[in-house]
Image (cartoon, rainbow, N blue to C red):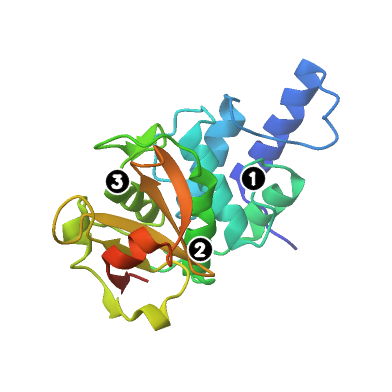
């Protein structure tokens, strides 16, 4: 006999009741998504926390923290990473085994690929000096935030991040590696995440937003310092 956790049963029941009460036309496709609140969201947060994907407050509010946790979970399960909890995601939440998460909180299924794709969800977030949240990032704050979502602690500043991980030659770059540059001051003063195909994603003060740039762009090619592999 298949044993289903009480939390999953309660979560499904809460979803059903939500759509019955509010008479939504989407009642046949149970969904929890950004902006919602209530017990169903609380149970979702609890399950994601149990599995190691959510570390925020169990506040019953489907905010950006819950959204990011859902996206990371969906990526780990090869589901469409849209941040919406529908039937497929609910089933995956029940079937997912905590043993597939390492003690550091990293997903064992090619985490470096996930970090690259996850980082791209923040394209066009405004650049903000000293920022390290989705309301605004500076370059090292972006790295600090992205890796923290995977349970990987990183120093806050670029020059300290440059001291972490394995030294990688430019010819060995893989998605998820960090690339460093000397820009407004000597030494590692700018950092981004390599995403493959000669491109890296970073919070750019010049572009005033999170953007993707070619590593071979003359400005960055001339200022390239090196790369580090964290994963």
Q: Within the image, what quadrant is residue 77 found in?
A: bottom right
List x then y, in percent, for residue 193.
Answer: 40, 60
| Residue 171 visible, this orientation | yes
Give the side of residue 199 with respect to residue 158, left or right. Answer: right
Q: Is residue 173 left or right of residue 154?
A: right
Mark 3: few/some/many CA within 10 Å (<14, 14-19, 20+): many
Q: Is residue 4 left or right of residue 111?
A: right
Residue pictured at 23% horizontal, 54% vertical: 183
Give the x, y percent position of residue 186. 13, 58
**Gap between marks 2 and 3 measured at Cα:** 29 Å
- Asked if residue 53 is positioned above or below residue 169 in the image, the reply reads above
Residue assigned mark 1:
8
Please say if 74 is above or below 86: below
Q: Quadrant of residue 188?
A: bottom left
State which tag comes first along the sequence, 1 or 2.
Answer: 1
Asked whether 119 or 200 is in front, the reply is 200
Q: Provide the secondary structure element on which disc 3 rests.
A: helix
Spatial distance from mark 1 to mark 2, Cα to Cα? 15 Å
Question: Which mark identifies residue 57?
Answer: none
Which residue position is annotated with label 2?
Answer: 98
Asked which secondary structure carries label 2, the reply is: helix
Q: Residue at the left extreme?
A: 186
- Within 10 Å of disc 1 (Cα), the crowding (few <14, some 14-19, many 20+) is some
Residue 20 point in image, percent of width and height = 80, 22
Q: Which mark is residue 141?
A: 3
- Is 23 displayed left or right of 67 in the figure? right
């Amino acid at each position: 006999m298949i044993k289903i956790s009480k939390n999953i049963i309660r979560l499904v029941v809460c979803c059903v009741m939500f759509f019955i009460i509010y008479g939504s036309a989407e009642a046949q496709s149970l969904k929890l998504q950004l902006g919602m609140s209530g017990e169903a969201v609380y149970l979702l947060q609890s399950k994601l926390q149990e599995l190691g994907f959510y570390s925020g407050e169990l506040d019953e509010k489907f905010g950006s923290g819950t959204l990011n946790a859902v996206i990371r979970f969906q990526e780990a399960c090869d589901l469409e990473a849209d941040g919406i909890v529908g039937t497929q995601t609910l089933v995956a939440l029940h079937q997912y085994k905590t043993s597939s998460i390492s003690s550091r909180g990293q997903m064992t299924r090619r985490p470096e690929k996930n970090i690259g794709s996850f980082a791209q969800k923040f394209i066009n977030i405004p650049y903000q000096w000293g920022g390290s949240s989705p309301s605004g990032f500076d370059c090292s704050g972006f790295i600090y935030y992205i890796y923290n979502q995977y349970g990987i602690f990183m120093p806050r500043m670029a020059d300290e991040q440059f001291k972490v991980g394995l030294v990688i030659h430019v010819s060995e770059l893989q998605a998820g590696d960090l690339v460093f540059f000397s820009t407004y001051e000597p030494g590692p003063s700018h950092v981004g995440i390599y995403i493959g195909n000669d491109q890296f994603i970073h919070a750019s003060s010049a572009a005033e937003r999170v953007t993707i740039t070619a590593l071979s762009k003359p400005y960055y090619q001339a200022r390239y310092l090196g790369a580090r592999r964290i994963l």
